[in-house]
Image (cartoon, coloured by chain):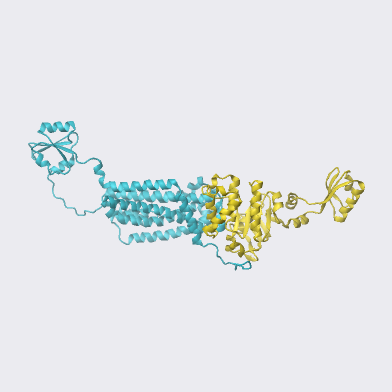
Amino acid sequence: MNATETIAPGQNSQIGFWSASGIVAQREVSVRLRSKSFIISTIIMLVFIVAAVVLMPRIGDLFGGPGSLAVTPETTEVAAPLDGYELVEVADEAAAREAVASGDADNALVAADNATGLLIISDREVSTTLVELLSVSPEVELLDENAPNPFLAMFIAIGFGVVWFSSALTFGSHTANSVVEEKQTRIVEMLLASVPARALLTGKVLGSAVIAIAQVAAIGLAAILGAAIGGNSIVLDGLAEPILWFIVLFALGFVMISALYAAGAALVSRTEDIPATTQPITWLIMLPYIAIIIFFNNPFALQIMSYIPFSAPVAVPVRLFLDSTEWWEPLLSLAIMFVTTALLIFFSARVYENSLLRTGKAMKWREALRTSA
Amino acid sequence: MESGRQYARSMIHIEQVNRSFGSTQVLRDVDFTISPGLMTGFVGGNGAGKTTTMRILLGVLEPSSGRITVDGEPMSAHYRAGIGYMPEERGLYPKMPVLEQIVYLARLHGISKQRATERATELLERLGLAERMKDDLQSLSLGNQQRAQIAAALTHEPHALVLDEPFSGLDPMAVENTLEVLRDVADTGAPVLFSSHQLDVVERLCDELVIIADGEIRAAGSREEIRSANTSPAWDLETDADTGWIRSIPGIDVIEFDGGFARFHAPDADAADAVLQQAISRGRVRSFAPYRPPLTEIFQEVIR
């Protein structure tokens, strides 16, 4: 470049939109990663998830095995095939009663003069397992061995609901705070002097999204990995696909939510005022969470929820788990979310641009849409 | 200074800018130039329109009408992105280390990370913040935060500077440091506009002056131009004897009078010389000199 060179009017070689967004996003990520509370809470959450998945199939073991069984010489043979019982051999029925009463054995099995020829002696409560093992049972034929357990379905529905709700809320609030911090400290004026408002918004949303998606993906992968290590077949067989869909839908849904939070926060000038404008967004992410708890076993309600962009990230994985969805339905949900996200980003960008430099009392959403800066 | 050279010696012209907020018009046909290589002082009372003008200059606000040109062409986004700006309301991230956020801001202006780090380090050292670079901004004193703010406006090697109250809150040493740094930028041929309430500082620093009141430019030009345009020539006379007799000379207007001292307006230098001759004949003259009113006085006169 030499001193006489002039720039043609309108030529724009300032920093590009995407490089500006990238630099802004980088800062958002590095600020978040530097927060000790974020790191610690993420680690705790991951440890908890892995522990839950690994331990789930072994919960029975935690409450002790079958226990010990006092047997007399007459019943030793009958008790021999009973799996897992620690046999305590005693001389006779009286000694067996004594053993149970004193706590030397949990139960006793003695010969008796009845239809089965056996008598179980227990302290306070009889072990149904023991009764079943010694009973003659009819043969059972299961029509759909793999049908989901309704309670399991509920827990899984709540699980997706909680992860969606808490992650969207936490990271959405982070986005909101970061927007207001810039307004409150007035640094936004320096930022706007170098980059357009839209680049700033894009960078913020992307930065938040990267962190939020990374965290949710880590949770999902921890669950799948934990299941693989612990041999938890429920998670491995039934949940891997729903979890992967959840991560995809969450990514899109989070971008949408976080853009809305940024726009809502731009309307106010002080951190204390954030809830005033972001309340409606909080409802948008809380309602699907409540709805999934109520409707987890109502296929029609779930179908509707899977087409509503705000509840799709929860409803689609639950339907996949219940196997109540056609192959194309998750794709349709994804397409609907994609379009909605695009529209809401456009809407948020307009609100954000128009309200970023306003100070004083909170603006109304409608006001910010109408006015121009 | 790649970006600096590209636009070296460009003239910024604020052309007939109007701006209203709702029904209140805050700027009326604001028109002045910021010359390359010069420091232009921008003075006006509170609410006179300084900050609004600067925001429009930076493209942070849109003018209702009028335009900003650089060497006669409308200011391009590229030029605008290379301006060093210090807004009236200070703002940096409280919980981010000083050096890191200055580098961040410079990168948004399109400077590479490495270049920005070098330049920011050098500036912070010159401004006396070398030891505090790694500290969070909020742990710095207000004066030091102000210095960090100045560094933030200069790190991207700006080809023009627009600074709102750059000296407020600085101690005299820091004012000198800052001034030196700003001078260096002006010496590269960059136009520099800065506002200040400290008229004595402006008087000492600026090459040109723009005075704004009620959203209108009341005076613009070099200090001497403004002085001669807005004040009639005056002289100070100090003698051993009483100077009361000056009042009776036709055409002479005494502004201030105190025993042997008199300050008076005279239509021209000859009339003033006549007064001096008479004073010599009446007693010993200790001093006689044209009076150069300080900026505060001109300012009061101009915004009236």
**Quadrant of the frame with the C terminus of chain A:** bottom right
Q: Is residue A5 above or below residue A361?
A: below
The location of residue B165, given as percent across then percent down, is 64, 51
Can the viewer see residue A371 in this picture?
A: no
The location of residue B229, given as percent across then percent down, is 77, 57
The location of residue A250, given as percent across then percent down, is 39, 55
Query: Would you say A230 lies left or right of A72 here?
Result: right
Task: Work out which residue is located at the far right of the displayed protein and give it.
Answer: B281
**Quadrant of the frame with the N terminus of chain A:** bottom right
Residue B208 appears in which quarter of the rendering? bottom right
Can the viewer see residue A276 in this picture?
A: yes
Query: Would you say B79 lies left or right of A133 here?
Result: right
The structure residue drawn at horizontal position 12% and vertical position 41%, both measured from the top left corner, is A79
Name the tint of chain A in the rendering. Answer: cyan
The structure residue drawn at horizontal position 60% and vertical position 59%, both measured from the top left corner, is B158
Query: Would you say A256 lies left or right of B19 here?
Result: left
Q: Is residue B219 above or below residue A61?
A: below
The location of residue B207, given as percent across then percent down, is 71, 56
Residue B222 appears in which quarter of the rendering? bottom right
Q: How many numbered callouts?
A: 0
Name the tint of chain B in the rendering. Answer: yellow
